Amino acid sequence: MVFRSLRRRMGVGGPAVDTVLDNPVTRPGDALSGAVCLIGGERDVEIERIVLTLVTREGASTAELAKLEIENRFRLGAGELHEVPLRLQIPLRTPVTHVYGERVPGLAVGVRTDLEVAFAADPEDMDPVAVHPLPAEAAVLEALRELGFRLKSADVSQTFEFWTAPQYQDIATEIAVGFVTRADELELVLDGRARTHHDRREHVDWTAEVDRLMRQIGHN
Protein backbone atom coordinates (compact mmCIF):
# COMPACT_ATOMS: atom_id res chain seq x y z
CA MET A 1 0.00 0.00 0.00
CA VAL A 2 1.54 3.32 -1.09
CA PHE A 3 0.09 6.45 0.45
CA ARG A 4 -0.08 9.71 -1.44
CA SER A 5 1.01 12.65 0.69
CA LEU A 6 -0.93 15.89 0.74
CA ARG A 7 2.13 17.86 1.85
CA ARG A 8 2.36 19.75 -1.45
CA ARG A 9 -0.84 21.58 -0.54
CA MET A 10 -0.79 21.46 3.27
CA GLY A 11 2.88 21.69 4.12
CA VAL A 12 5.24 19.22 5.75
CA GLY A 13 3.52 16.89 8.18
CA GLY A 14 0.17 16.73 6.41
CA PRO A 15 -1.99 13.59 6.14
CA ALA A 16 -1.72 10.92 3.43
CA VAL A 17 -4.43 8.99 1.57
CA ASP A 18 -4.70 5.82 -0.51
CA THR A 19 -7.70 4.21 -2.18
CA VAL A 20 -7.45 0.43 -2.15
CA LEU A 21 -9.80 -1.58 -4.39
CA ASP A 22 -10.59 -5.20 -3.54
CA ASN A 23 -10.42 -6.02 -7.24
CA PRO A 24 -9.68 -3.41 -9.94
CA VAL A 25 -11.02 -5.74 -12.66
CA THR A 26 -14.71 -5.16 -13.35
CA ARG A 27 -17.48 -4.99 -15.96
CA PRO A 28 -20.16 -2.39 -16.73
CA GLY A 29 -23.05 -2.78 -14.31
CA ASP A 30 -20.89 -4.30 -11.55
CA ALA A 31 -19.64 -2.48 -8.45
CA LEU A 32 -16.18 -1.72 -7.11
CA SER A 33 -15.54 -2.28 -3.41
CA GLY A 34 -12.62 -1.41 -1.18
CA ALA A 35 -11.61 1.31 1.23
CA VAL A 36 -10.17 4.80 1.39
CA CYS A 37 -7.30 4.66 3.88
CA LEU A 38 -6.02 7.81 5.58
CA ILE A 39 -3.04 8.33 7.86
CA GLY A 40 -2.93 11.47 9.99
CA GLY A 41 0.08 13.73 9.76
CA GLU A 42 1.83 15.61 12.53
CA ARG A 43 -1.28 17.46 13.60
CA ASP A 44 -5.03 16.98 13.80
CA VAL A 45 -6.98 18.10 10.72
CA GLU A 46 -10.63 18.45 9.80
CA ILE A 47 -11.58 16.33 6.79
CA GLU A 48 -14.37 18.16 5.01
CA ARG A 49 -15.40 15.25 2.80
CA ILE A 50 -14.15 12.36 0.64
CA VAL A 51 -15.43 12.14 -2.92
CA LEU A 52 -14.78 9.23 -5.29
CA THR A 53 -15.29 9.82 -8.99
CA LEU A 54 -15.21 7.20 -11.73
CA VAL A 55 -13.52 8.87 -14.67
CA THR A 56 -12.57 7.90 -18.19
CA ARG A 57 -9.66 9.28 -20.17
CA GLU A 58 -9.09 9.22 -23.90
CA GLY A 59 -5.97 11.09 -24.90
CA ALA A 60 -6.13 14.47 -23.17
CA SER A 61 -9.91 14.32 -22.62
CA THR A 62 -11.39 13.34 -19.25
CA ALA A 63 -15.06 12.68 -18.46
CA GLU A 64 -16.85 11.78 -15.23
CA LEU A 65 -19.03 8.66 -15.25
CA ALA A 66 -20.17 8.36 -11.62
CA LYS A 67 -19.56 10.10 -8.31
CA LEU A 68 -19.83 8.98 -4.70
CA GLU A 69 -19.45 11.06 -1.54
CA ILE A 70 -18.62 8.49 1.10
CA GLU A 71 -18.10 10.47 4.31
CA ASN A 72 -18.89 13.91 5.64
CA ARG A 73 -16.80 16.12 7.92
CA PHE A 74 -14.70 14.36 10.58
CA ARG A 75 -11.48 14.92 12.53
CA LEU A 76 -8.39 12.93 11.60
CA GLY A 77 -6.01 12.76 14.55
CA ALA A 78 -2.23 13.06 14.27
CA GLY A 79 -0.83 9.68 13.21
CA GLU A 80 -4.32 8.12 13.20
CA LEU A 81 -5.21 5.40 10.69
CA HIS A 82 -8.76 5.84 9.42
CA GLU A 83 -10.43 3.55 6.87
CA VAL A 84 -13.68 4.32 5.09
CA PRO A 85 -15.31 1.45 3.14
CA LEU A 86 -16.41 2.18 -0.41
CA ARG A 87 -18.78 0.70 -2.94
CA LEU A 88 -18.97 2.41 -6.30
CA GLN A 89 -21.42 1.31 -8.99
CA ILE A 90 -20.04 0.99 -12.54
CA PRO A 91 -22.58 2.42 -15.03
CA LEU A 92 -23.51 0.35 -18.08
CA ARG A 93 -22.17 3.16 -20.27
CA THR A 94 -18.65 2.75 -18.89
CA PRO A 95 -16.26 2.14 -21.81
CA VAL A 96 -14.47 -1.18 -22.08
CA THR A 97 -10.71 -0.80 -21.59
CA HIS A 98 -9.70 -4.42 -22.19
CA VAL A 99 -10.58 -6.56 -25.23
CA TYR A 100 -9.34 -10.11 -25.77
CA GLY A 101 -7.53 -9.79 -22.44
CA GLU A 102 -5.43 -6.86 -23.61
CA ARG A 103 -5.65 -3.15 -22.85
CA VAL A 104 -7.16 -0.93 -25.54
CA PRO A 105 -4.51 1.71 -26.38
CA GLY A 106 -5.44 5.28 -25.53
CA LEU A 107 -8.36 4.40 -23.22
CA ALA A 108 -8.31 4.47 -19.42
CA VAL A 109 -10.88 4.24 -16.64
CA GLY A 110 -10.10 4.86 -13.00
CA VAL A 111 -11.27 6.03 -9.61
CA ARG A 112 -10.23 9.55 -8.62
CA THR A 113 -10.11 10.29 -4.91
CA ASP A 114 -10.70 13.86 -3.78
CA LEU A 115 -9.95 14.45 -0.12
CA GLU A 116 -11.03 17.91 0.99
CA VAL A 117 -9.33 19.13 4.15
CA ALA A 118 -10.18 22.43 5.82
CA PHE A 119 -8.75 25.18 3.58
CA ALA A 120 -7.08 22.67 1.20
CA ALA A 121 -7.71 19.89 -1.28
CA ASP A 122 -5.54 17.01 -2.40
CA PRO A 123 -3.86 16.82 -5.82
CA GLU A 124 -5.79 14.85 -8.40
CA ASP A 125 -4.87 11.18 -8.71
CA MET A 126 -6.50 8.22 -10.44
CA ASP A 127 -6.37 4.56 -9.46
CA PRO A 128 -6.73 2.54 -12.69
CA VAL A 129 -9.61 0.11 -13.24
CA ALA A 130 -9.66 -2.61 -15.91
CA VAL A 131 -13.12 -2.73 -17.50
CA HIS A 132 -13.83 -5.94 -19.40
CA PRO A 133 -16.82 -6.56 -21.71
CA LEU A 134 -20.07 -7.99 -20.42
CA PRO A 135 -20.55 -11.68 -21.34
CA ALA A 136 -22.83 -10.87 -24.28
CA GLU A 137 -20.44 -8.21 -25.58
CA ALA A 138 -17.48 -10.55 -25.15
CA ALA A 139 -19.35 -13.22 -27.14
CA VAL A 140 -19.85 -10.77 -30.03
CA LEU A 141 -16.21 -9.69 -29.97
CA GLU A 142 -15.10 -13.32 -29.93
CA ALA A 143 -17.38 -14.10 -32.90
CA LEU A 144 -15.78 -11.25 -34.82
CA ARG A 145 -12.33 -12.64 -34.11
CA GLU A 146 -13.37 -16.15 -35.11
CA LEU A 147 -14.67 -14.81 -38.43
CA GLY A 148 -11.32 -13.16 -39.09
CA PHE A 149 -11.97 -9.53 -38.12
CA ARG A 150 -8.98 -7.73 -36.55
CA LEU A 151 -9.43 -5.04 -33.91
CA LYS A 152 -8.08 -1.68 -35.04
CA SER A 153 -9.16 0.74 -32.28
CA ALA A 154 -11.88 1.62 -29.76
CA ASP A 155 -13.13 4.81 -28.13
CA VAL A 156 -15.13 5.98 -25.11
CA SER A 157 -18.39 5.86 -27.08
CA GLN A 158 -18.00 2.06 -27.19
CA THR A 159 -17.38 2.03 -30.91
CA PHE A 160 -14.89 -0.61 -31.99
CA GLU A 161 -13.14 -0.28 -35.34
CA PHE A 162 -12.22 -3.56 -37.04
CA TRP A 163 -10.31 -4.49 -40.15
CA THR A 164 -12.85 -6.53 -42.07
CA ALA A 165 -12.38 -10.29 -42.47
CA PRO A 166 -11.19 -11.42 -45.94
CA GLN A 167 -14.55 -12.95 -46.92
CA TYR A 168 -16.24 -9.53 -46.57
CA GLN A 169 -13.65 -7.39 -48.36
CA ASP A 170 -16.07 -6.78 -51.22
CA ILE A 171 -18.44 -5.18 -48.70
CA ALA A 172 -15.99 -3.01 -46.74
CA THR A 173 -12.34 -2.93 -45.71
CA GLU A 174 -13.13 -1.51 -42.25
CA ILE A 175 -16.23 -1.79 -40.09
CA ALA A 176 -17.48 0.06 -37.02
CA VAL A 177 -19.03 -2.13 -34.33
CA GLY A 178 -21.13 -0.54 -31.60
CA PHE A 179 -23.00 -1.78 -28.55
CA VAL A 180 -26.05 -0.28 -26.86
CA THR A 181 -26.30 -2.17 -23.59
CA ARG A 182 -29.42 -1.96 -21.45
CA ALA A 183 -30.41 -3.81 -18.28
CA ASP A 184 -31.62 -6.93 -20.11
CA GLU A 185 -30.95 -6.21 -23.76
CA LEU A 186 -27.95 -5.89 -26.06
CA GLU A 187 -28.18 -4.04 -29.34
CA LEU A 188 -25.40 -4.70 -31.84
CA VAL A 189 -24.86 -2.08 -34.54
CA LEU A 190 -22.57 -2.66 -37.53
CA ASP A 191 -21.38 0.36 -39.46
CA GLY A 192 -24.54 2.25 -38.49
CA ARG A 193 -26.45 0.39 -41.21
CA ALA A 194 -27.36 -2.97 -39.69
CA ARG A 195 -28.49 -3.76 -36.16
CA THR A 196 -30.00 -6.53 -34.07
CA HIS A 197 -31.50 -6.75 -30.58
CA HIS A 198 -31.22 -9.72 -28.24
CA ASP A 199 -32.03 -10.49 -24.63
CA ARG A 200 -28.69 -10.63 -22.81
CA ARG A 201 -29.79 -13.73 -20.91
CA GLU A 202 -30.34 -15.81 -24.05
CA HIS A 203 -27.74 -17.80 -25.96
CA VAL A 204 -27.17 -16.32 -29.40
CA ASP A 205 -25.12 -17.67 -32.30
CA TRP A 206 -23.23 -14.41 -32.74
CA THR A 207 -21.05 -15.77 -35.54
CA ALA A 208 -24.19 -16.34 -37.62
CA GLU A 209 -25.64 -12.98 -36.56
CA VAL A 210 -22.53 -11.04 -37.55
CA ASP A 211 -22.39 -12.86 -40.89
CA ARG A 212 -26.06 -12.06 -41.49
CA LEU A 213 -25.58 -8.38 -40.66
CA MET A 214 -22.51 -8.09 -42.88
CA ARG A 215 -24.38 -9.56 -45.83
CA GLN A 216 -27.29 -7.24 -45.07
CA ILE A 217 -24.89 -4.30 -45.38
CA GLY A 218 -23.65 -5.72 -48.66
CA HIS A 219 -27.18 -5.73 -50.05
CA ASN A 220 -28.00 -2.17 -48.96
Image (spheres, helix red, strand yellow):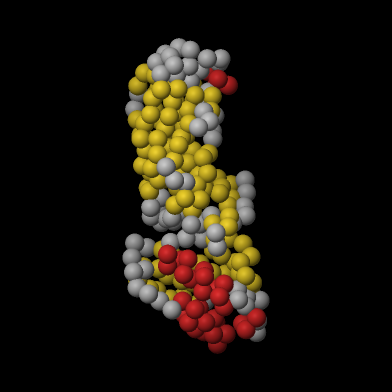
Q: Tell me which corner region of the image, top left, top right, bottom left or bottom right, holds residue 215.
A: bottom right
Q: Is residue 125 above or below residue 210?
A: above
Lateral position of residue 57 relative to residue 71, left or right: right
Q: Is residue 63 visible?
A: no
Q: Nearer the viewer, residue 59 or 149?
A: 149
x, y percent for residue 192:
52, 72
Q: Position of residue 216 (x, y in %)?
A: 52, 84
Q: Nearer the viewer, residue 23 or 174?
A: 23
Q: Is residue 205 above or below residue 5?
A: below
Q: Residue at x 36, y 31 (%)?
A: 84
Most distant residue in the front direction: 1
- The percent position of residue 1, horizontal first and vertical second, equals 50, 32
Measured as percent of width and height from the top left, residue 44 is found at 42, 13
Image point (50%, 47%), residue name: 129
In this rendering, is residue 178 above or below 114?
below
Q: Is residue 12 visible?
A: yes
* Residue at figure coordinates x 35%, y 35% from the top left: 85
The quadrant the C terminus occupies is: bottom right
Query: From the viewer's perspective, is 199 left or right of 52?
Result: left
The picture quadrant where one finds residue 160 is bottom right
**Outermost residue, top side:** 43
Residue reaching furthest to the bottom:
219
Q: How many marks?
A: 0
- Residue that appears at 43% across and 79% down: 205
Q: For this rendering, which residue is in front, 114 or 207?
A: 207
